[in-house]
Amino acid sequence: MKILNFGSLNFDHVYQVDKMVQEGETVSADRYCRHFGGKGLNQSIAIARAGAQVYQAGAIGQDGRDLVDYLKSCGVDTGYISILEEASGHALIQVDNQGQNGIIVFSGANGLISEDMIDRVLEHFSPGDYITLQNETSNIPVLLRKAYEKEMVIFFNPSPIPEDLKQIPFELVDYLFINKSEGATLSGEKDLDKILAVLMNKYPNCSIILTLGSRGVCYVDKENIYTHGIYDMPVVDTTGAGDTFCGFFIACMSRGVPIPKALETASKASSICISREGAAPSIPTIQEVESWDLIPVKNRVETVRRLAKAENE
Ligand code: RIB
């Protein structure tokens, strides 16, 4: 079984600010750094650092060779990345004193993934292979349909959430990673229990992994509901925490790790990620994660217990 990640590769321009810039304002940044990023690249690095082999597909410009070299240095197979005439994607990221971020993404070459490129990559993969997707590259609906026809196991993190949800065949997805605001947009509900109930009703064959920041994570499928809390770490920069979670969870699934243990490992990895600066550089290795056994877990998600109770009544 192989793992393909068809996703974005960005240069992240990160500005440390006292307070996020608001409409009509100009603010000074205290610090500037350039990191490697993009939800695709981050998730591949997380999968590789979690100890699994991953093939990254996607597109960069002539300016993007450092992105490929970085992926290679992290053990990711980069053979399916196309080099196009367009500039590589980039993101402008503000990080405030609480470690929270605000991101603008320019897709660049990530927005030029064609159907032909998709076909050329997928022909190297087989039924049962994993594919992981985010929503920073073009032609996601086509990619989802082709991966489904090929009987690949589909992991989808629809971030940034698209305006036109109807275009995306969510019903083809096996594992859906969303945060609360994405869940609210997809379900039309605000309350956590209702979000999960609506999504399970709409997509009964999908496993939903709802990440809730400081409140932890809920996992729901047809038969199971699990929750896990976060770990008590200083918040330096939350950028890439979601990608770290996805990558570690996918790597655990590929090794047949039971869901509760996969949630624990992915939660530990993303808690370590937020205690460091940057996206890709802050992603820990599996060895680091396994040596952090003593960090106390906190803030389990109570609401899922209510959902489970309601279902049993
Ligand atoms: O999820 C974090 C990523 O979002 C950053 O690395 C940035 O490139 C944006 O795509």
Image (tube, rainbow, N blue to C red):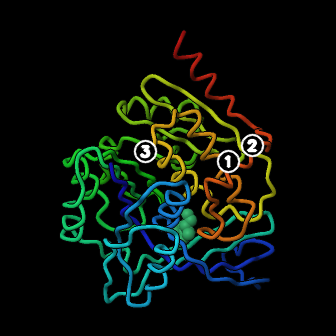
Task: Write down which quadrant ligand 1 falls in.
Answer: bottom right
Q: Which quadrant: the C terminus?
A: top right
Alpha carbons under labels 2 and 3: distance apart: 22 Å
Q: At 45% across and 53% down in the image, what residue appears?
A: 157
Q: Give the vertical position of 189 relative to 63 (above or below).
A: above
Confirm or deny contact between disc 1 and disc 2 (CB under 8 A).
yes
- The front one of 276 and 53 is 53
Mark 1 lies within 8 Å of ligand 1 (Cβ measured) = no
Crowd tier of the residue under label 3, counting other residues whose Cα lies within 10 Å: few below 14, some 14–19, many 20 or above = some
Mark 2 lies within 8 Å of ligand 1 (Cβ measured) = no
Q: Mark 1: which amino acid? A: Glu
| The furthest residue to the top | 313
Query: x, y (%) of residue 90?
Result: 50, 79
Q: Mark 3: which amino acid? A: Ser
Per the rendering, the mark at residue 4 is: none
Residue that mark 3 sits on: 254
Query: x, y (%) of residue 50?
Result: 55, 54
Q: Considering the numbered disc 3 on the image, is that residue within a helix, a strand or a loop?
A: helix
Per the rendering, the mark at residue 290 is: 1
Crowd tier of the residue under label 2, counting other residues whose Cα lies within 10 Å: few below 14, some 14–19, many 20 or above = few
Q: At 52% across and 46% down in the image, what residue appears?
A: 249
Per the rendering, the mark at residue 293 is: 2
Q: Earlier in the sequence, mark 2 or mark 3?
A: 3
Alpha carbons under labels 1 and 3: distance apart: 18 Å
Q: At 69% across and 29% down in the image, what residue appears?
A: 302
Among the 4 quarters of the image, the one containing residue 137: bottom left
Q: At 52% across and 64% down in the image, what residue appears?
A: 45
Query: x, y (%) of residue 146?
Result: 21, 54
Q: Mark 2: which amino acid? A: Asp
